[in-house]
Every structure is written in structure tokens, then in C-alpha cells.
Image (cartoon, rainbow, N blue to C red):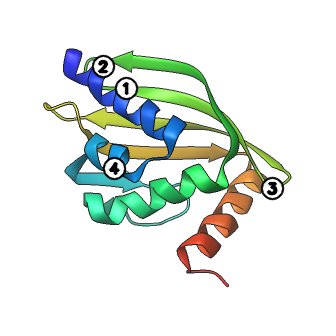
Amino acid sequence: MQQAVDGLALWHQFVRERDPLVLEAALAEDAVFHSPVVYKPVNGRAAVMPYLLGAVRVLEDFSYARAFSRDDGAVLEFNARVGDRSVQGVDIIQLNAEGRISDFAVMVRPASGLEALRLAMGRLLGVIQ
């Protein structure tokens, strides 16, 4: 249980501070990320980090509204803005035995907010001009 608490504490520290070193410490080496807009999962810490680092840049006024947790993970409901679009979503976080994030899935609504997020992340990651 304490490992899960510590793992989630690192995640919340990253969200507050946006420190890549904290994110690196929070993620398992074999972490998997499920984007709300990318078809295939993103595998491995090095590949996952740009997505999560980008998300904290494009999701403005980000705050968690509710949390549902258990020993090995949590579902965190959030509210944010991308430009003039409001978004609501959930982060579904699975922790491994060491308390590091092993699986991270994001779901976002409404469709207009998801599209704004897709465009902003695509520009940031260099996949959309």
C-alpha cells in the first residue's frame, strides 16, 4: 500500500512541478501509455515521457476533481482547458510492485476538447504542422 501512495505522490509532484526528473522517477522502465487519440499504446519510459511532458504544457488550468484509488493504482478525474475548449477526463494509473507507474490511460471529453487536445499535442510533438 505504501508503495502505491509513494508512486501516486510522485505523479502529483510531477503535475505540480512539471519536473522531467520527477516524471522519470514515477514511471516504470516498461511503462505503457494509452493516449486518447493515438491508436496504438506507447511503450517504454523514454517513449511515454514526451506525451506526459507535453500534456502538462497544453492542458491549462489543470486540476484533479476526484480520485478513486486502490492498492495498485487510481482513477483521477480532471478538468482543464486547451485554448478556448474545456476538457474533462480521467487518468487511469496502474502501479507495479515497486510503486512506479506501469500503465497510464487517458480518456477525454467532449469531442471538441479532445480535438483541441489532439491538435495541440500534435503541434507540440511535431506530428502536425
Percent from the top left, x then y, of residue 120? 68, 66
Given residues 123 and 116, the one toward you in this image is: 123
Tell me the quarter of the image containing the N terminus.
Answer: top left
Residue indicated by mark 4? 21
Percent from the top left, x then y, of residue 41? 36, 61
Task: Determine whether the residue tagged by mark 4 lies in a helix, strand or loop.
Answer: helix
Q: What residue appears at the point 33 percent right and 49 percent down from the top-left corner?
A: 21
Sequence-first tag of 1 and 3: 1
Task: Determine whether the residue tagged by mark 3 lies in a helix, strand or loop.
Answer: loop
Sequence-first tag of 4 and 2: 2
Sequence-first tag of 1 and 4: 1
Whether pointer 1 and pointer 4 mark residues with C-beta atoms closer than 8 Å, the reply is: no
Q: Residues within 10 Å of mark 1 (few under 14, many from 20)?
A: some
User: What is the residue that sits farthest to the right in this orientation?
Assistant: 84
| Whether residue 110 is visible | yes
Whether pointer 1 and pointer 2 mark residues with C-beta atoms closer than 8 Å, the reply is: yes
Q: Which mark is residue 5?
A: 2
Taking 72 as reference, is 59 above or below it?
Answer: below
Percent from the top left, x then y, of residue 115? 71, 61
Q: What residue appears at the point 33 percent right and 66 percent down from the top-left corner?
A: 47
Q: Between marks 1 and 4, how big is the CA–CA gap?
A: 14 Å
- Residue 34 falls in which quadrant of the image? bottom left
Identify the amino acid type marked 3.
Gly
Q: Residues within 10 Å of mark 4 (few under 14, many from 20)?
A: few
Sequence-first tag of 3 and 2: 2
